[in-house]
Image (cartoon, grey):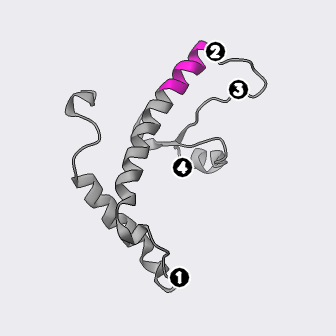
Amino acid sequence: MNSSNAIMVDKGFLIDDLCMSKNIQIIRPPFLKNKIQFSKSEALLNKDIASARVHIERINQRLKVYKILQNKFIWSHNYLAFDIITIISGICNLSTPIFANDKFPV
């Protein structure tokens, strides 16, 4: 799987058609539906996705420390939202890595 062409979503995100048209793989945790338990492969997939979600939450926490994102955003400034998020994300990307160097596959 090429991570640059994949998106992790939860059950409620119904964007399969859009992702397929853009050649983007959807990574979605399995759900039990009418089953009593997951198959072995579903359980392993669920474990891997849960592991990755922990890191996503860590990244989200880094974004939330900026005061501009903690307050109500003035509607007349909505045109700045994309630029603000881009700058804050860039600052977060330049901070201490979430993963240690030994966690990246070579």
Q: CA distance from mark 3 to mark 4?
A: 28 Å
Tell me the mark number nearer the camera, choosing from 4 and 1. 1
Of the two numbered discs 1 and 3 on the same chain, state the one appearing first in sequence: 3
Q: Is residue 77 above or below residue 23?
A: below
| Residue type, label 2 | Ser
Magenta residues span 39-47
Name the residue that disc number 1 marks. 75
Quarter that holds the C terminus: top left
Of the two numbered discs 1 and 2 on the same chain, state the one appearing first in sequence: 2
Name the residue that disc number 3 marks. 32
Query: CB under 8 Å between callouts 1 and 2?
Result: no
Query: CB under 8 Å between callouts 4 and 1?
Result: no
Compared across the picture, whether 69 is left or right of 98 comes to: right
| Residue type, label 1 | Trp
Q: Quadrant of residue 87?
A: bottom left
Q: Residue at x 50, y 24 (%)?
A: 47
Q: Residue at x 60, y 42 (%)?
A: 10
| Residue type, label 3 | Leu
Name the residue that disc number 4 marks. 22
Q: Residue at x 45, y 72 (%)?
A: 71
Q: Residue at x 47, y 27 (%)?
A: 48
Of the two numbered discs 4 and 1 on the same chain, state the one appearing first in sequence: 4
Q: Is residue 4 visible?
A: no
Q: Is residue 62 visible?
A: yes
Of the two numbered discs 2 and 3 on the same chain, state the one appearing first in sequence: 3
Q: Is residue 78 above or below residue 70?
A: below
Position of residue 14 measured from the top left corner of the image (x, y, whole percent): 67, 48
Nearer to the camera, 72 or 7: 72
